[in-house]
Amino acid sequence: MPDSKAKSIASKMTCKEIFAFLSEYVDGELSEELCEAIQTHNGNCPPCQAFVDTFITTIELVKKQPAKPLPPAVKDELNAALNRCREALDQAR
Ligand SMILES: [Zn+2]
């Protein structure tokens, strides 16, 4: 079952790997198993989930306005999400 394989990948996945895979994940370049593994990890890891959600929202905004630079408010929100993530990771270790 692909589902259990994704779960076993997810159980070995670290938050750092989530960040490393993020741009490929958003671009749809990851295998189905890795996508599921990221989703499974996010289901158990609120900081990663918050970060991925913010990241995807930002990418979608940028895609809607390809000619414009990233609005400062969006940039701030992305940075804030990243910082929250890092703090959560620091506390976890
Ligand atoms: Zn995580």
Image: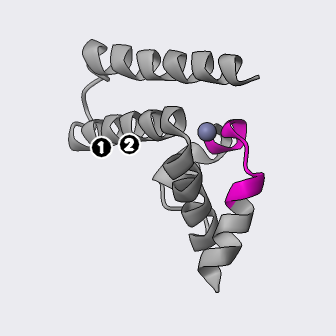
Query: What label does residue 56 carry, if any?
Result: 2
Element class at badge 1:
helix
Amino acid type assigned to the residue bearing label 1 in the image:
Glu
Q: Which image quadrant for residue 18?
A: top right
| Image quarter for ligand 1 | top right
The percent position of residue 65, horizontal first and vertical second, equals 22, 36
Q: Is residue 66 magenta?
A: no
Give 12 or 54, whichever is nearer the viewer: 12
The percent position of residue 36, horizontal first and vertical second, equals 55, 65
Q: Is residue 8 left or right of residue 87?
A: right
Q: Is mark 1 within 8 Å of ligand 1?
A: no
Residues in magenta, as a range: 10-18
84 shown above or below 36: above
Mark 1: few/some/many CA within 10 Å (<14, 14-19, 20+):
few
Mark 2: few/some/many CA within 10 Å (<14, 14-19, 20+):
some
Give 10 or 31, whichever is nearer the viewer: 10
- What secondary structure characterizes most of the magenta part? helix
Pick out the residue farthest to the left.
64
The percent position of residue 89, horizontal first and vertical second, equals 66, 24
Residue identified by numbered label 1: 60
Element class at badge 2:
helix
Give 80 or 58, whichever is nearer the viewer: 80
The quadrant the N terminus occupies is: bottom right
Q: Residue at x 62, y 70 (%)?
A: 33
Q: Residue at x 59, y 21 (%)?
A: 88
The percent position of residue 13, horizontal first and vertical second, equals 73, 50
